[in-house]
Image (tube, rainbow, N blue to C red):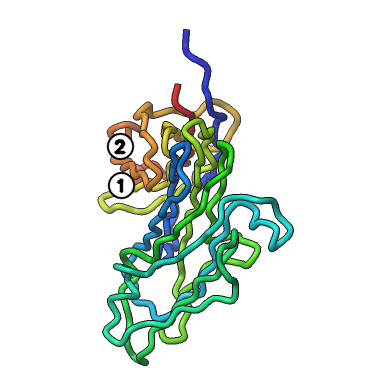
Amino acid sequence: MTPPLRCVLGLVWLLALAPASLAALTITVGTHQVPEGANIIQVPVSIAGGDPVTDMVGVVQVGDGGPLVGGSNGPTITAVSYAGSVWAAAPGGFANSATVTLPAQIYDPNVSLKVAGQKVSGSGLLFTLTFDVAGFNPGRFELKLAGTRGGDTSFQCSGTNVPVTINNGWLLVGTNAPVIPVAPRLAIIPAGAGRVRLSFLTETGCVYNVQWRTDLAPGPWAEITNGISGTGGQAIWLDDGSDTGQLPGLAGRRFYRIRAQGAK
């Protein structure tokens, strides 16, 4: 008998095979487990893409933002460190500011380079957050840099907006915190020679399978049972035709989705 799933199936976003408009930068917050009994946890937040930046208007929210914005209590941000970050690489230094006093559940870490004309690479450590998790029962708190009550984290390079894709994450407090897969946002990227690359954010403790069809008529989807284990980071799968019978570039059109389930 197949054991029952401990996590609900994730919803999906469907993307037809078409030229993609990609963001220059990507932030992946990831899933971070806090062992039961721990009082403090540090969470590094990284950025990838490499496009140069000069300024960041940041927003970080824990859960629903807390009493400051009419929400409920949750873990609080107690410190933000830029040690070893991309900002620290600027020869002329950087300035950081905020309008919210820590500790708080919603915070605005804003950064700008001090010397005009200097730029830093948008690839590496963005900042490190320290959270106070003392006194909270096992639970799941979303860590947001996008879709917060204060808007989205954004970047500029010498006054020009730099596009960014932000994958929010989770803070799991206690060893028995439930792991429920959220809907993975699926990116479909041409990979040359008629192939495509699928990329999506995973949750630690969940398992993912790629499904595909040539149309959206009612009926079953073909599943590729590759059982990708979630790590809290990005997962990548290449469709080169070996599992689907034909190169995507020769198929006319092809649709994909991701089925997510928890550990059995």
Residue 229: horizontal and vertical position, in percent?
36, 34
Q: Is residue 83 above or below residue 138?
A: below
Q: Amino acid at mark 2?
A: Gly
Whether residue 108 sits left or right of residue 22 in the image: it is: right
Q: Of the numbered discs in the image, which one, if any, rests on residue 241?
A: 2
* 1 and 2 marks in contact (CB < 8 Å): yes
Q: Amino acid at mark 1?
A: Arg
Residue 101: horizontal and vertical position, in percent?
58, 71
Residue 105: horizontal and vertical position, in percent?
59, 59
Whether residue 193 sits left or right of residue 181 in the image: it is: left
Who is closer to the viewer here, 235 or 223?
235
Residue visible at 37% across and 92% down? 116
Q: Which residue is mark 1?
A: 195
Packing grade of label 1 (10 A; few <14, some 14-19, many >=20) is some
Packing grade of label 2 (10 A; few <14, some 14-19, many >=20) is some
Residue visible at 47% across and 33% down? 175
Q: Of the numbered discs in the image, which one, if any, rests on residue 35?
A: none
Residue visible at 53% across and 44% down? 14
Q: Residue furthest top?
A: 1
